[in-house]
Amino acid sequence: MATFLYKLGRLAFRRRRLVALLWVALLALAGTGAATAPAATTSSFSIPGTEAQKAFDLLEQRFPEAAADGATARIVFKAPQGQKMTDAANKAKVDKTVAELKTGSDQIASVTDPYTAKAVSHDGSTAYVSVAYKVNGMELTDATREALQEAGHHAQGQGLTVEIGGDALQAMPETGSGEIIGVIVAGIVLVITFGSLVAAGLPLLTAIIGVGIGVSTITALASVLDLGSTTSTLAMMIGLAVGIDYALFIVSRYRAELAEGHDREEAAGRAVGTAGSAVVFAGLTVVIALVGLAVVNIPMLTKMGFAAAGTVVIAVLIALTLIPALLGFAGTKVLGRKQRKGGEAGDKPNVGTRWARFVLRRPVAVLLAGVLGLGAIAVPAASLEMGLPDDGSQPTSTTQRRAYDLLSDGFGPGSNGPLIVVVDGDKAAADATAKTIQGIQGHVFVSPPTLNKAGDTAMITVVPKDRPSSAATEELVHDIRDAGGDDVLVTGATAMNIDFSQKMNDALLPYLALVVGLAFLLLMVVFRSVLVPLKAALGFLLSVVAALGAVVAVFQWGWLGDLFGVEQTGPIMSMMPIFMVGVVFGLAMDYEVFLVTRMREAYVHGERPGEAIVTGFRHGARVVTAAAVIMMAVFAGFIGSSEQMVKMIGFGLAVAVLFDAFVVRMAIVPAVLALLGHKAWWLPRWLDRALPNVDVEGEGLREQLGGPASDDDRELAKV
């Protein structure tokens, strides 16, 4: 592989104008496709194989007039102090609002009158109007949303407190200036690392080009492939981070090759041939982790994983081709001022060298400190509660959250998540089911059955006693399912969330086995070792559990919530554990590959295990540190998002990189390698013969370029 990549790097350097033109053309093509493609009209959320989804599908088939997949809204009214919503004046205002809503849009399927639908609280202080739409929230027109808001404002201007909830007001997440700040921080780190504006600018430029191509392609295909708004957000988040990092490693190695006296084309070839091998394998681990999300069998998550994996592939291809091409244009400006004047020594001890020697002197102490520290941070993960965010997790400044609170006060917390029980049977079966549900504890209201036109299917609305995300509501759902039999199905947003969480839990172990197993095999090929990949996987599990502990402490317990803009604590998003396993595993292996391949290279060329660790840190620690800081900055930029899910993902990935890069890879890994000594690189002979030799250390390349490795060659660092 190293020989092939060496030739590719030299070719891209020589044909730099053609290579640059091809990438610019790809960017223009993707941008044009995104600009001319129809807007995504749907963002369907389905969970194949669950009872909630079966009930939902049955409603679509038997109850088409109910618009089961349509958006919903609730306009909540609260009377002034001393008045009731049943007072004639207030009733007239509500009636006027209902009339306005019915004529406000042709996308409306139904509008309920609170006075006939029993939607007035017992004390008469609160009432709500339910609005059902023919299309889902993403397909609603701006005019329809404006009509909904105006109807509420008109009533509010007449003395009533009016708030609007429901997914009809669902908006695209706003990430604000966070990503820009992340890129600026990345730029500062690159300038400090390289001491050259040109060298710092190359990774930023190529990462932005890669993300531009990836996100534009996703936008262009959004309508055709039914891609949601968070799909491109994840692709942007991962694409920026790995795009900058992969380019950083190639540029850093190129500078080292120039410092060794090679001409520019040769340096570009060697940089891509050596560091490029690590980029390919690091990229492969990320792609495996992201594509593996398909195991969960939730279409939304599968699409997010494939889209982000595609962006990672683009980042790898750009690092291997566009970076050497741009290095050809940059000339010697890619070097810092000291290097251009010949005043920067390559072998003097640096911080990485001193840290590695410290770890070698005290491996047990460093290992214990790292493991116990992450273990303590991981403790809150034992209290993990999972669910999907609803309007109760919105900031208190939003009308959705205020509507949620008004409904809770007036009708009880369960009114925010009514259950829909679907009975596949006639009126007698529906009445019997309603009677059975009446005898089950945990609800405050059971509606009479509503039959479809054919009379073979009925809907029953059940209002739980507790809030939608509570354990008591989950127990109620299970009790209804157990008592109802095969012809009684429970659905609705609350039941969908419960089934989603269960599906994520069931998929976690198979997903872990698949992703960690495949990556373990891949790392065995890279490192020609059994214990090094095992240590890499165990270290990753420690860092990801610690990151989950931090997420629970902030988003569920509320610790430092004000600092991170968490206005409402609640259950952790159901997909968070499996999502963090997928993304963080791929990113964690980046550092493992970049840092430990250099140690492996030194060991193969005759250095003792301890010397190899120091060599790896001397050449790789500074660049890996810069890469980790950049990733943390990019992910942390998404903490400013208005969307709770994006905020949580950004925070979780940022702290996971912090723990994995600086505690696991920089402390625990060298400590374990120091304790293992020669045993770290042990591989049974039969396995050595069975595994393919991909020449990550560049042995074949060295032979082609001029014989065995010399002491000077040994200094050609793989970063």
Image (tube, rainbow, N blue to C red):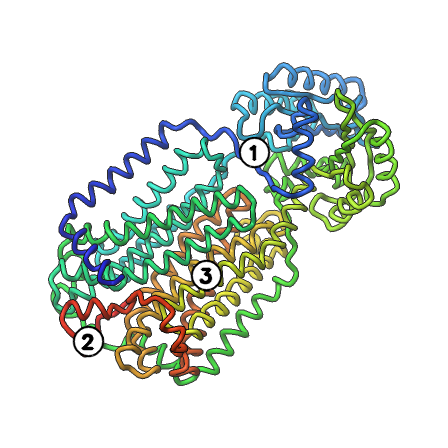
Across and down, in percent, residue 502 comes to 65, 50
Residue located beneath label 3 in the image:
518
* Of callouts 2 and 1, the N-terminal one: 1
Element on which disc 2 rests: loop
Q: Is the residue marked by circle 3 packed among few (<14), some (14-19), or many (20+) residues within 10 Å?
A: some
79 or 553: nearer the viewer:
553
Residue type, label 3 = Leu
The part of the image, by quadrant, that contains residue 344 is: bottom left
Q: Residue 709 has which mark? A: 2
Across and down, in percent, residue 177 comes to 41, 43
Q: Do the residues labelled 3 and 2 touch (CB within 8 Å)?
A: no
Across and down, in percent, residue 190 comes to 29, 58
Residue 190 located left or right of residue 340: right
Element on which disc 3 rests: helix
Instruction: Give me the residue at 46% from left, 61% from top.
Output: 518
Instruction: Give me the residue at 35% from left, 69% from top.
Output: 595
> What is the C-alpha distance between the residues marked 3 and 2?
32 Å
The part of the image, by quadrant, that contains residue 65 is: top right
> What is the C-alpha distance between the residues marked 2 and 1?
62 Å
Across and down, in percent, residue 449 comes to 81, 28
Q: Do the residues labelled 3 and 1 touch (CB within 8 Å)?
A: no
* Of callouts 3 and 2, the N-terminal one: 3
Q: Residue 170 has which mark? A: 1
Element on which disc 1 rests: loop
Q: Residue 91 has which mark? A: none
* Of callouts 3 and 1, the N-terminal one: 1
